[in-house]
């Protein structure tokens, strides 16, 4: 950036002569061509100790005690107000790279910047305040004709006689209701293990709180104000998302897993996570392929689902065809079985007819005939038969015939001829 040099000076820290020690700050202010002011600063040494003149040129706070290292800042601002500060800090724990809003807290040993603020829907009203003391030294505030007694960091309704209170001071009170208290934590950290970038937000439904600020030195509160809680805070919700690359896990045996891991959480529970290691990719989400020519994306999950649907459709069609063929086969087999049963039954009836029609030729003389009948039974089937037998006039030739009937209208018959040779 080019600009006009406004001021450069050397300011020592830790009570050390800046001309003899490295522990020093090097502030630089440049007026950008647009008229905005850019404040640049490099500090080396104990970064959490106050400067020689007990003033700080930072618009944020460095957390911790005796944090040694180097921090470089570049604060962008209007001609009167700093809007944000880019912070790069190096300590024994690692490298921190964050943007610090005004009033935030930077932890150089963890690589985080924390900002606490009220949500936009919180309502703050200001009113005059009177401070009283009771006979036993308790503190009581009167705000908008309502009396509160101080109990630790809380204000509770005063139950005593207000006429017995002693006025000790006056001031102003800012009462905040509604909305939420949001704690925002951004991370940008390079450690010896991995590189982590992320952000988290914790929101607590705001109870009623009162900030008491003094305009009278007799009141027992500093001008910066003390915050008292009137009603308890409500439900807490949280969410976070971060990405980590490098060593992402170490098991009990000390084996390290190298890779990349991106994680989203809600209220402390992992809602989405993707891990990339040499072993492969594990994800709760989806993987998409990008066509380099068209830029179109194809979801692996969607592709597999569509492919599965197509395969299922073909399998279903094949199964329907198989079912149809099996039905036809079963029908044919049933008809065949029925025919076999019919043939079997008819055969059994034929045997029964044959048994019924069997008859020995009776002992009759030449020119005589005889009538006979019989019944036959075989494998559950029964038949009846009637027959006739006759001997011709020569006394040697005989003829017999019979007809048999079964239960299925089956009819069978036989005819037999015999001739006697020799003798008389």
Image (cartoon, rainbow, N blue to C red):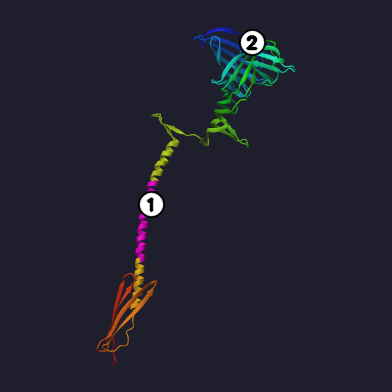
Secondary structure of the residue carrying tag 2 is strand
Q: Is residue 367 left or right of residue 118?
A: left
Q: Are marks 1 and 2 in contact (CB under 8 Å)?
A: no
Residue 200 versus residue 229: which sits nearer the camera?
Answer: 229
In the picture, measured across the screen, residue 288 lies left or right of residue 328, that is right
Above-or-below relation of 312 to 369: above
Nearer to me, 295 or 319: 319
Q: State the residue at coordinates (57%, 28%).
A: 237
Q: Of 362 and 288, which appears nearest the observer?
A: 362
Position of residue 416 measured from the top left corner of the image (x, y, whole percent): 29, 81
Distance in Å between CA atoms under marks 1 and 2? 92 Å
Dot label at residue 323: 1
**Image x and y of residue 57, in percent:** 61, 12
Classify the position of the C terminus by image quarter.
bottom left
| 178 to 52, vertically: above or below | below
Residue at far left of view: 393
Q: Which picture quadrant has residue 125?
A: top right
* Location of mark 2 (residue): 11
Say few, some or many: other residues with alpha carbon within 10 Å of mark 1 (under 14 / 14 to 19 / 20 or more). few
Magenta stretch mostly in which secondary structure? helix
Highlighted range, magenta: 316-341
269 part of magenta stretch: no
């Amino acid at each position: 950036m080019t600009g006009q040099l406004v001021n450069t000076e050397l300011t020592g820290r830790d009570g050390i002569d800046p001309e003899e020690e490295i522990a020093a700050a090097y502030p630089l202010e440049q007026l950008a061509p647009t008229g905005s002011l850019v404040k640049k600063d490099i500090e080396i040494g104990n970064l959490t100790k106050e400067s020689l003149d007990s003033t700080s040129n930072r618009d944020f706070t460095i957390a911790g005690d005796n944090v040694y290292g180097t921090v470089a800042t570049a604060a962008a601002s209007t001609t009167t107000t700093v809007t944000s500060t880019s912070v790069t800090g190096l300590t024994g724990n690692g490298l921190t790279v964050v943007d610090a809003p005004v009033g935030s807290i930077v932890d150089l040993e963890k690589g985080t910047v924390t900002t606490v603020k009220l949500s936009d829907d919180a309502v703050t009203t200001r009113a005059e305040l009177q401070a009283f003391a009771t006979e036993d030294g308790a503190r009581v505030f009167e705000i908008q004709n309502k009396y509160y007694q101080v109990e630790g960091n809380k204000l509770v309704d005063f139950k005593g006689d207000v006429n017995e209170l002693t006025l000790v001071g006056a001031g102003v009170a800012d009462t905040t209701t509604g909305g939420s208290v949001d704690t925002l934590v951004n991370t940008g950290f390079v450690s010896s293990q991995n590189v982590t970038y992320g952000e988290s937000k914790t929101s607590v439904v705001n109870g009623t709180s009162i900030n008491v600020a003094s305009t009278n030195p007799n009141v027992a509160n500093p001008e910066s104000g003390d915050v008292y809680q009137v009603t308890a805070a409500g439900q807490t919700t949280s969410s976070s998302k971060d990405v980590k690359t490098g060593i992402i896990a170490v098991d009990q045996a000390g084996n390290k897993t190298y890779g990349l891991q991106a994680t989203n959480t809600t209220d402390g529970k992992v809602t989405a996570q993707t891990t990339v290691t040499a072993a492969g990719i594990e994800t709760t989400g989806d993987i998409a392929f990008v066509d380099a020519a068209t830029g179109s994306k194809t979801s692996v999950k969607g592709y597999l689902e569509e492919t599965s649907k197509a395969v299922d459709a073909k399998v279903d069609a094949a199964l329907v065809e198989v079912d149809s063929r099996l039905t036809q086969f079963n029908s044919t087999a049933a008809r065949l079985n029925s025919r076999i049963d019919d043939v079997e039954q008819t055969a059994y009836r034929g045997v029964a007819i044959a048994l019924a029609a069997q008859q020995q030729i009776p002992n009759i003389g030449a020119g005589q005939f005889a009538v006979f009948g019989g019944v036959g039974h075989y494998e559950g089937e029964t038949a009846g038969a009637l027959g006739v037998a006759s001997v011709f006039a020569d006394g040697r030739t005989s003829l017999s015939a019979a007809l048999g009937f079964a239960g299925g209208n089956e009819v069978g018959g036989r005819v037999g001829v015999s001739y006697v040779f020799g003798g008389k």
